[in-house]
Image (cartoon, helix red, strand yellow):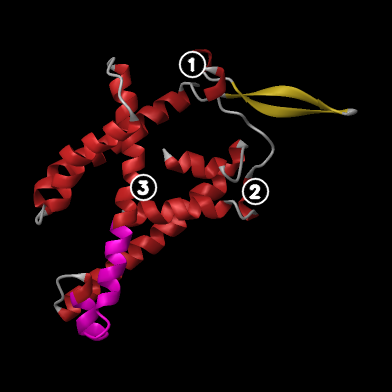
Amino acid sequence: LSLPAGIAAFGNAPSAVLPAVALICIIGGFSAYGFSLIGRVCSYTGGQSYRGAWSESVGDETSWIPAVTCTFKTCFAVLSYSMILGDTIRALLMTCGIETTRTLALLGVTGTTLLPLCLLKNLSSLAPFSLAGIAGMFYTTIAMALRYLGGSYKVGQAAVKGGSKTAAAAVPAGKYIADVATNYQPQFGNLGASAALSPNVFILICMLSTAYMA
């Protein structure tokens, strides 16, 4: 869900998705190469961890650098995902008629789910759930493709007058747009692919970097 927000941070026209897809592919390629390079180094040196590979390839004196970096990265990743989980769990409980605060929802999911996961020394038991998550992503992709081909995400055109000129602007016109609250309906403008040159594109880049590292 953060990727659409990252795209909306620099563009508000449908064509903004073009540079966004290009960035997703490019940064994904960098991430894949980086992880494969780590695997090759571990294979060559016999290291079993970032620190072990660093010790064998660079030196034991500075092997604390990747260890500390991974620790801080993990802490910030857990913090960012905890904020998302807190809001999500609270919203899900409210749909079931259970009123709770964001703090209680966050403490509940941290104590019952996140803490036990962090205490696991062997993550092989999570492999089936990872496979289920991948299957869910494929299911979501197929569902979105069917909705798109069925016209559910259709974008209409509305005349917009500006002085003596009249231009066409994109407006949401999907099949289910009437069921969406007005304040949640997408709003389009004229910041398309060219808006990728603005500094706001780094918001999407940072989101992608975090997503690929996670």
Residue bearing the label numbered 2: 195
Q: Residues within 10 Å of mark 1 (few under 14, many from 20)?
A: few
Q: Which of disc 3 and disc 2 is earlier in sequence? A: 3
User: Over which residues does the magenta segment extend?
Assistant: 52-74
**Left or right of 48, for residue 204:** right
Relative to 119, residue 90 above or below: above
Q: Residues at badges 3 and 1 in contact (C-beta under 8 Å)?
A: no
Picture residue at 61% right of the left edge, 42% below the top: 11
Q: Which of disc 1 and disc 3 is earlier in sequence? A: 3
Kind of residue sitting beneath label 2: Ala
User: In 3D space, how far apart are the residues under numbered discs 1 and 2 (Cα atoms)?
Assistant: 29 Å
Q: Residues at badges 1 and 2 in contact (C-beta under 8 Å)?
A: no
Q: Does 82 lie within the magenta span?
A: no
Point out residue 41 in the picture as x, y percentages from the top left corner: 23, 76
Which one is in front, 184 or 41? Answer: 184
Point out residue 75 in the picture as x, y percentages from the top left corner: 30, 56
The local secondary structure at tag 2 comes to helix
Which one is in front, 133 or 88? Answer: 88
**Left or right of 60, for residue 87:** right
Q: Quadrant of the N terminus?
A: top left
Residue bearing the label numbered 3: 80
Kind of residue sitting beneath label 3: Ser
Picture residue at 27% right of the left edge, 18% below the top: 98
Point out residue 153 in the picture as x, y percentages from the top left corner: 51, 25
Specify the principal SS of the magenta part.
Answer: helix
Mark linked to residue 176: 1
Kind of residue sitting beneath label 1: Tyr
Picture residue at 27% right of the left edge, 16% below the top: 96
Point out residue 93 in the picture as x, y percentages from the top left corner: 28, 22
